[in-house]
Image (tube, helix red, strand yellow):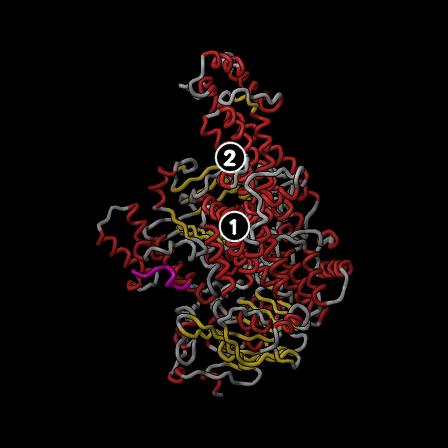
Amino acid sequence: MLEVRDLRISFRTEHGRVRAIDGVSFDVAESEILGVVGESGSGKTISLLAVMGLINDPNAVIEGSIKLRGRELIGLKASEMRKLRGREIAMIFQDPMTAMTPVYTIGWQIAEQIMVHERIGKKAALARAIDLLAEVNIPNPREAIERYPHQLSGGMRQRAVIAMALSCNPALLIADEPTTALDVTVQAQILDLIRKLRRVHKSAIVFITHDMGVIAETADRVMVMYSGRVVERGTKAEILLEPRHPYTKALLDSIPPLEGEKPRRLKSIPGSPPSLLDLPKGCSFGPRCPSRFDKCAEKPPLEGGAHAAACFLKAAP
Amino acid sequence: MTAAPLLEARNVTKQFVIGNRFTAQGLRTVHAVDAVSLKIMPGETVGLVGESGCGKSTLGRCMTRLYDITGGELYFEGVDITTKTLRQMRPLRQRMQMVFQDPYASLNPRRRIRDLIAEPLRVHLRLSETEVRDRVRQLLDVVGLSPDHMDRFPHEFSGGQRQRIGIARAIALEPSLIVADEPVSALDVSVQAQIVNLLADLQERLSLTYVFIAHDLSVVRQVSTRIAVMYLGSIVELGSANDIFAKPSHPYTQALISAVPQPDLKKAGERKRIVLTGDVPSPINPPQGCRFHPRCPFATDKCREERPVLTEMAGTRSVACHYPLTA
Amino acid sequence: MLLALIRRFGQMIFVMFGISVLVFLIFFVTPGADPAARIAGRNASPETLEAVRKSFGFDQPVWVQYYTLMKKLFVTQDLTSFVNRGWKVVPAVIDTIPVTLSLVIGAAVLWVIFGLLVGLIAAATRGSWIDKSLMALGLIGCAMPVYWLGEVMNLITQSRYHDSWMFSWVPPLGYKPLTEDPKGWFLTLVIPWITLSILYIGLYGRVLRANLIEAMQEDYIRTARAKGLSETRIMLRHALRTSLISFVTLFGLDFGALVGGAALLTEVVFGLQGVGKLTYDALQNLDLPVIMTTVIYASFFVVLANALVDVVYILLDPRVRSA
């Protein structure tokens, strides 16, 4: 349903053009959960902001193609894009503490979104808001619509944000680290909720996270990003059990285990992710890669069919 | 353990008063840390874990006397430091240091690295300028940074490198105790592992004692010898890291561990997830009886009325629960 | 919420009481000076001095003196000036209040409307030439001293171009009471309103623009965009509403201060017999009872305006209501 082809995003800055996204392609099928993993600066958030049409920077240059159910989104008129946002594609953000306008009630903010997209009265919109809050397991939804964001706990607020995102039954929901700011026990509740909503609403979900554990619990397919490129993609089992790209492997190895024997030292990746201003030539993971060889001075293409890795080592069978 | 504890907290309590007496609610008391007793032995790493509002950071700051405590007593190397003034604390500060979560915020952006690291040396020790420079060079080397970086400013470093600078500052005076407050939570996973390894190396080389505060359970398990699980201002379970994770005794510990999402798909089928209901209650108005009872799947009337105290079980384990899971 | 309001007003009364005590102490109980001599003015005769002593009860304990003064100010209102013999001070101050209020309220209406417009338009067109020229004009408005601007206005409308079609409607300087001559009231005040408001339009426009631009960076604005709202709606409903808080704070402080006498220069330039002008004259004559009364009046107004600002806060920001 969502087809992204060769997406390139760059920013004009005083240091010249900075390429944030370099030829990213991916698909999302109806009612599947695609997990997008990467560290800060990997471009995972910005590529999905592009899908939302939410890159407002006048210095941004966006090229490539983003098709939602066959309709091209790049170059779409602002007013047309606005009609899609919130109705066809919705997005929830990382920090529920600041995601809602502090001076309006939860009910008002949910009803606002419904009323913008549908011909519906305020009463009917509020009634829908109550149903939505009930659906995301907020206790006493009738009272909750009268609450202001600051009166709810973090977990409850994230539920309200999710209810708002679902209010127009979007075909695609983009969740940008929706549980990172929450406590572990609350995170478990929200992950349960997201799985349940996928079953009920049949929305496709793109789940952005840096946490491989969260991926294991939610995603069907996974896409691993590193400095603006997709380095590996495949099903959850393929990525977590038989990672092909050295970066994916190293990332999985650097997570301390929760059970069994403690390793004396953690396997870590030397160095830090490259600055976008100064990307290495060829494979951008090259300088930190343990299995680097001569060929890595060229840019590796993403090859290998369904389970693809952008690495010369693995592409050769 | 027969040795004397390096740091001992006896019934340490910390309350904050917030609000304004002219607003509707008036002044309110936050019970951040509630009668916590804990002994830190030399050479060990004690992990403090818990969710937001459990008081782990506050306890860490009380231990280093960054906060004055409301009640209880603190002993460092056998000396009562409960009521020491700032001036009296100064010589002791060399022996106990803190490392903070946000390496971006804890370094003055307008000063060069050499000055940032040299600052504690200049304040506490009488060294000549060449001695200071040699020491800074040596410290940078110890934490894995090139001495060529001495003249750079903090913004020229990545998050992981900045945390290395923060650590270099903390070990500059050769302390015996380092309280690290979420030192790796702002870092990317790949960099996090580097810092965890660095802390382990330094512990060995400089025979340091750590109090390691974090919300990430897998990191805490990795670095700690003992772990104290906190909930709403109190320690609910205390014991060796391996034991606690293998066989949690407190229902909260059990739920907390089971809630951590793990990337290991092979074991996913075997694991039983316990999803707690509700949120952590506010430390302004903690529940009566056992503070965990509103969310506890096993709560009885006794739990609602009587507050369990931290009692020693077999071995080194202590639990504050009327019905511990592993008897 | 009602409780919060009552508390806030209780606090206000308490502060006002504190101010009255402080003013009393400064004027009456300062050591080393005879308050009677100061009240009586320069070169007062021994009989006058004696009358002052009796009238203010300087032979009695301090708290009785305070009580006497408060009674003269608020109950009997017969505090008399000794510099201008027999002049009743309290009615004189009360007489000036409508003048100052007319001036300041009219100007406030102008500066709130235009301040909002300037701020909103500049923030919406950020970086464009419209934004840049509005900000430049705002800076000029802030920088022009009000007495100079007033004199220039007078020069243009009262003498140079008074006979042209543009300004022939401008009446001579002075004040016409609203109840007696509404049209005259309005016409005499138009030019003073514009003069006084220009400074504040510049200031408020700039402050609001900065606040709006800051608010537009907030996470909840991104959420609002993700909801598919129009930019206009985002600006007016989401960004403006949260930016108004500092706008209102500023307004309360400025309005209170102006009503309390800070519009002095405008009043002097346009020959308006307001509170500021009265204080100014009293200072020149060292007329202590008048100074004292206007000081208390002015500080009460600042306190009242601040209390009202807090009430507006409670209405604007739900977080204040419960926190």
Dot 1 lies on which element?
helix
Q: Is residue B313 visible?
A: no
Q: Among all residues in the image, which is located at the extreme bottom?
A: A317
**Which of the 4 quarters of the picture holds residue C175?**
top right
Q: Dot 2 falls on which chain? A: C
Residue closest to the eye, A199 or A299: A299
Query: As displayed, is residue B287 above or below residue A136?
Result: above
* Residue in the picture at 51% in, 85% down: A303
**B63, above or below B213, in the image:** above
Give the structural element (helix, strand or loop) at label 2.
Answer: helix
Nearer the observer, A130 or C242: C242
Q: Residues in magenta?
A: B151-158
Q: Amino acid at mark 2?
A: Lys
Q: Which residue is mark 1?
A: C198
> Are there few (<14), some (14-19), or many (20+) residues within 10 Å of tag 1?
many
Quarter of the rendering containing residue A26: bottom right
In the image, is B307 to the left or to the right of B192?
Answer: right
Q: Which mark is residue C277?
A: 2
What is the chain letter for disc 1?
Answer: C
Residue lying at 70% horizontally and 72% vertically, measured from the top left: A202
The residue lying furthest to the front in this view is C163
Q: Are marks 1 and 2 on the same chain?
A: yes
